[in-house]
Image: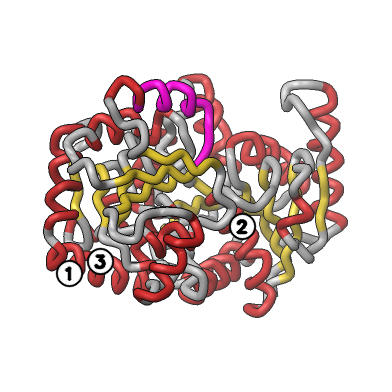
Amino acid sequence: MARVGFMIDTLAPGAGTENQLILLLSRLEAHGHACHLAFLETHPRFPEAGVTVPVYEAGVGKLASFRGAAGMVGTARWMRRSRLDVLVTFFRDAGLFGTVAARLAGLPVVAARRNLGYWQSPREIRLLRTLRPWIHAYVANSEAARDHTAEIEGVDPVRIAVIPNAVDGSRFHPATAAERRALRNAYGFPLEAPLVLCVANLRPVKGHDTLLRAFTRVPKDAHLLLAGDGPEEGALRADCAKLGLDGRVHFLGRVPDPAPFMRLADMGVLASRSESLPNALVEMASVGLPLVATRAGGNEEVLAGGQAGVLVEVDDAVLLGDRIAAFLANETERRDLADKARRHAASVYDQDRVVRMWAEALTVWSRRGVPDAGAGIRSEV
């Protein structure tokens, strides 16, 4: 059994990475691992996560401060006191902070990589490269994230394991016709209108501006549901007015549980400019929605290179709109690709399979020395 520490900036249910970590904390004990959780600061909604493992708060704000340096020393003491065998870090600040603290504690570090670096400045990349010798191994949630980490951070790909995100099949499953009608009635959507769903935070990287332009090419009886909130909402609402989409685009805001909206929709779409592995796309595939997405990072993996959905180039509003319209007009194609997407998601992203991969990998990582003992880790441990 390994004693595993997980460190993240802060933790609350709702976002993709946070939900994945909550899943691991709840399931790894059954595989013989004792989990501990650490974060830099407590989130007000942390109690909603239902975490039952021991928790440590570093209580630091800015990392480059006396408080940050003192926090690293205190966190190193916590690691030794908890007798951890390995530390897994998520996100930028926790990754930087945790790597140094674990170095002080003599503890191997596994760094999670779950994006394609759209937030990374040249200075941050230099810092990541500087810390590379102190990192035991890396775990990416997609082949795209693995390739990006190897290229940008200069990591030998053999040191990067690929363990995908997990989907909970008990929550994300196809709806019966009766369930679909009931959900549409409950949320006030027309029973027969084509409903296209996008689940993504309203940020520039998610490409909602392109999606709105694309939707002007979709028949006027179709409606677009946008599940998510973010800083772009005002600009996107203004775009709707300019494009004549008022009344056809519905801003749902932050949706704690997107599963009901997935089960009432006719198809899913994601217009991202950059993705590592989008949970929403995996979840919509599991629900059995036919999918159209951009060729952005892990989107291609979720749609099996176009075998389980339609892929279009990033920012091509014309093709995106035409493919959505064609999809809505062709029920046979929708059903065929939706079935392929659902079967692909069940085989690759099943939560039992993913948790088992983590458990096996952590057993390996906890028994290796530091700092360069990640050699030999393969994409499926």
Mark 2 vs mark 1, CA separation in Å: 33 Å
- Local SS, label 1: helix
Mark 2 vs mark 3, CA separation in Å: 28 Å
Residue linked to disc 2: 21
Q: Name the chief secondary structure element in magenta.
A: helix
- Which mark, by number, is residue 199? none
Quadrant in the picture for residue 368: bottom right
* Residue 311 horizontal side relative to residue 190, left or right: left
User: Residue 46: in sight, yes or no?
Assistant: yes
Residue type, numbered disc 3: Ala
- The answer to whether 133 is drawn above or below residue 279 in the figure is above
Q: Which residues are magenta?
A: 228-240
Residue drawn where x is 42% and y is 42% of the image: 226
Mark 1 vs mark 3, CA separation in Å: 6 Å
Check if residue 175 falls in the magenta segment.
Answer: no
- Which mark, by number, is residue 338? 3
Residue drawn where x is 54% and y is 55% of the image: 373
- Which mark, by number, is residue 336? 1
Residue type, numbered disc 2: Leu
Residue type, numbered disc 1: Asp
Classify the position of the N terminus by image quarter: bottom right
Where is residue 302 drawn, in percent x and y?
Answer: 31, 58
Classify the position of the C terminus by image quarter: bottom left
Give neighbour class at mark 2: few <14, some 14-19, many 20+ (Cα, 10 Å).
some
Quadrant in the picture for residue 335: bottom left
* Residue 14 horizontal side relative to residue 308, left or right: right
- Local SS, label 2: helix
Residue drawn where x is 74% and y is 45% of the image: 39
Where is residue 233 drawn, in percent x and y?
Answer: 48, 28
Whether label 1 touches label 3, CB < 8 Å = yes
